Image (spheres, helix red, strand yellow):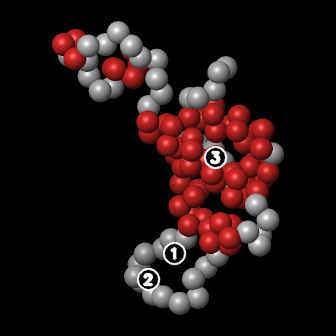
């Protein structure tokens, strides 16, 4: 990498100098990849049933909105400015989904 600790390089500058993407972008890319895979699964598959299912028992605070795994799965897409209303339709096409999330997270080779 050519970076030594004596160079007093900041944490933000080091990945840029090493030509490495940030770990945050890598994690978002992985989350979005998994989200796309789950959305393409058949409805009977366990991961999809868990993500899209609703609990029949339990209580929540009155003022808190319902937090479902499906909503939490959409959060990375929203952070990358991927259309929140049409992301599932986009994820149906694996190649287009992969290209979209790579562009959004800065991992594309374009």
Name the secondary structure under disc 1. Answer: loop
> Which residue is situated farthest in the bottom direction here?
57
Q: Please state the horizontal and vertical placement of residue 59, each as a whole percent of the image.
A: 45, 87
The answer to whether 75 is drawn above or below residue 24 in the figure is below
Q: Earlier in the sequence, mark 1 or mark 3?
A: 3
Q: Which residue is mark 1?
A: 66
Residue name at image x 39 percent, y 23 percent: 15
Closer to viewer: mark 1 or mark 3: 3
Q: Residue at x 79, y 51 (%)?
A: 92
Q: Position of residue 74 (x, y in %)?
A: 59, 56
Circles 2 and 1: CB atoms closer than 8 Å: yes
Q: Secondary structure at mark 2?
A: loop
Neighbour tally class for label 3: few under 14, some 14-19, many 20 plus, Cα within 10 Å: some
Mark 2 closeness class: few <14, some 14–19, many ≥20 residues within 10 Å: few
Tags 1 and 3 touching, CB below 8 Å: no
- How far apart in space, not on screen, are marks 2 and 1 (Cα)? 8 Å
Give the labeled residue for mark 3: 33
Q: Residue 6 appears at what percent x and percent y? A: 18, 13
Residue at 51% from the left image edge and 37% from the top image edge: 26
Separation of marks 1 and 3 at Cα, in angstroms: 24 Å
Q: Quadrant of residue 35?
A: bottom right
Mark 2 against mark 3, which lies toward the viewer?
3
- Mark 2 sits on what residue? 60
Q: Is residue 84 visible in the rendered structure shown here?
A: no
Please state which of residues 30 and 58 is positioned toward the viewer in this rendering. Answer: 30
In terms of secondary structure, where does tag 3 sit?
Answer: helix
């Amino acid at each position: 990498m050519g970076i030594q600790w004596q160079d007093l390089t900041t944490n933000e500058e080091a990945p840029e100098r090493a030509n490495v993407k940030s770990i945050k972008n890598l994690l978002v890319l992985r989350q979005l990849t998994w989200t796309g895979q789950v959305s393409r699964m058949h409805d009977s598959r366990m991961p999809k049933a868990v993500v899209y299912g609703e609990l029949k028992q339990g209580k929540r605070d009155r003022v808190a909105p319902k937090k479902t795994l499906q909503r939490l799965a959409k959060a990375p897409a929203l952070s990358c400015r991927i259309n929140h209303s049409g992301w599932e339709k986009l994820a149906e096409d694996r190649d287009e989904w992969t290209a979209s999330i790579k562009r959004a997270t800065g991992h594309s080779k374009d």
